Image (spheres, rainbow, N blue to C red):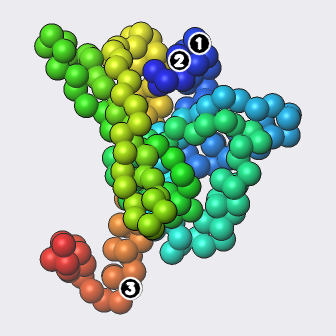
Amino acid sequence: LQVLYDMYHDWDKVLDLTFFKLEELVSSLKKHIKQRERIDAIIWDDAGVYGSKYLFFSNKKLTEYLQKLFDVVGTAVKGIIITTPNPENLLKAIRGYEFYRVKIYKDGYMDEETRRIARGYKNVLLPSGKHVVRTVFNDYYDVTIPDDVYKEYKQMREGYTDMALDELEEILNKAKKKKKRKGEDDWEEEWYEEE
């Protein structure tokens, strides 16, 4: 959020350009492409939820079109900030592009709890074919954002958390019904034993 605020100096615009669901991200990009409007940057927050590498197995066509979109996305947006706890869980169609990986660390400067370092890394291919990871930047910043902005962002995030939980619950209910149809009453015990 801080990166977009540094670019736009408008918290409302920052929140408008922050997406969780893939459908909303695609819809916004489509709108900007149709209007021949190029924006500086957007955020796809918690991209692993709707851009998981497992999406390939459930919807190969969507994965194919998503890769095509990322091939031409530069006509609509100069940069996409993708957040995820683990980049390896993203679709290969997304991971395959050249990008910076940024890891956030506590600064520790004068025991200030809100100071962070965003350290950017780039995977570099040497002429020998060997890949090396290089640190390319350090950005020092304060994580504090206005309370009203944080409250709105938190509501957005909680809404998507609720949706993800609802989807998981739906899958569990379908599994339960399927097991019951097969006459397997102890589906819960089997489910947990597999883990």
- The residue indicated by pointer 2 is 5
* Helix, strand or loop status at disc 2: helix
- The residue indicated by pointer 3 is 181
Whether residue 135 is visible, yes or no, is yes
Spatial CA distance of label 2 from label 1 is 6 Å
Which picture quadrant has residue 54?
bottom left
Residue pictured at 74% horizontal, 39% vertical = 76
Q: Quadrant of the C terminus?
A: bottom left
Query: Marks 2 and 3: which is nearer the front?
Result: 2
- Choose between 22 and 93: the one closer to the eye: 93
- Choose between 182 and 11: the one closer to the eye: 11
Q: Is residue 174 left or right of residue 116?
A: right
**Pointer 2 local density, CA inside 10 Å: few below 14, some 14–19, many at least 20:** some
* Helix, strand or loop status at disc 1: loop
Residue pictured at 54% horizontal, 52% vertical = 98
**Pointer 1 local density, CA inside 10 Å: few below 14, some 14–19, many at least 20:** few
- The residue indicated by pointer 1 is 10
Which picture quadrant has residue 162?
top left
**Pointer 3 local density, CA inside 10 Å: few below 14, some 14–19, many at least 20:** few
